[in-house]
Image (cartoon, rainbow, N blue to C red):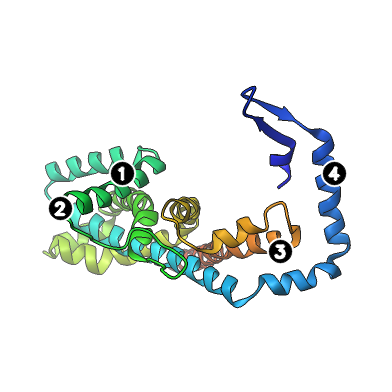
Amino acid sequence: MNIPVFLKFNAIDRKIDVDLSLYWEYSKSNLLWFVHIKDEIPFIFEYLNASSIHKYKYTMSIISLSILYAIIVSLAVSVTIMLLPATFRKRIKSIVDFITSAPELLIIFLLQYLVIYLFRTYGIKLFQLYGGISTQPYFLPVFVVSFLPTLFFIQFLLAEFAKEELKDYVLLARAKGLSRSTIYIKHIIRNIIPLLLIHLQVIVWYILPNVIVVENLFNIDGYLNVISSFYLKRIVPYIISLLLLTVPVLLTYFLSWIVTIRMNRKEQYSL
């Protein structure tokens, strides 16, 4: 947290200056906050006020809805792609691979430009673009935040579906005359969902940086404004705010751990 103090950008000379003395002073000051943490209790309670909790719930709702959106859309799109003829399937896979190779910021800016272009050219306002003190948009932030994670999920599911098609139970179902849609919806998806839940811990790391970009880009008064207000000012509330931001990461890791244990037990019982 003190590295920005240690490395300072000199705009005049266009170089990075190293200030070890100032870094050391900030480090000692931060350590003293933890030594005298009792004096920080009033500021901690001030931090945990109704406004901060409301902003925290709003940002967490965007993250939760983005995860849910990525799961539902990726499952629906990947199953649809797998039910298409082989030629169309290869073309769509190549398109998905191409889009996912693009930088995240480029995709976010393009989506924002598309909404602005439609509104200025055709007068079409699909949804609220920017936030404010009294407005908290949901649809566009969730869509933008989950756009690339959804594509990564689709890539993952397409690869897993291709592996699953070669397994014995799928061949048996085809031999019995079951349709491909029935095989995918009733059998393959049921075996893929645990793998999907395990990979949520990876997707969350894609979603969190996107939330930071989107809240700044769309002028959303979310939880990140609360975090930035304590940066290099109040170290203890700043650390608490960062720890609260890691809640979705910890929950997805815990979920992944539980699903992994259940899958291992199921394999042992089946053997």
> What secondary structure is found at the residue carrying circle 4?
helix
Q: How crowded is mark 3: few (under 14 residues within 10 Å), some or many (20 or more)?
A: many
Q: Nearer the viewer, residue 70 or 184?
A: 70
Tell me the distance, in whole angstroms, between the alpha carbons under discs 4 and 3: 19 Å
Q: Nearer the viewer, residue 120 or 23?
A: 120
Residue at 26% x, 66% y is 187
The numbered mark, 4 or 2, whose residue comes first in the sequence reads: 4
Q: Nearer the viewer, residue 186 or 67?
A: 67
User: In front: mark 2 or mark 1?
Assistant: 2
Q: Residue 110 carries which label?
A: 1
Q: How crowded is mark 1: few (under 14 residues within 10 Å), some or many (20 or more)?
A: few
Task: Tell me: 38 left or right of 210.
Answer: right
The residue tagged 2 is 122
Q: Which amino acid does label 3 sit on?
A: Pro
Q: Residue 25 carries which label?
A: 4
Q: Is residue 40 above or below residue 225?
A: below
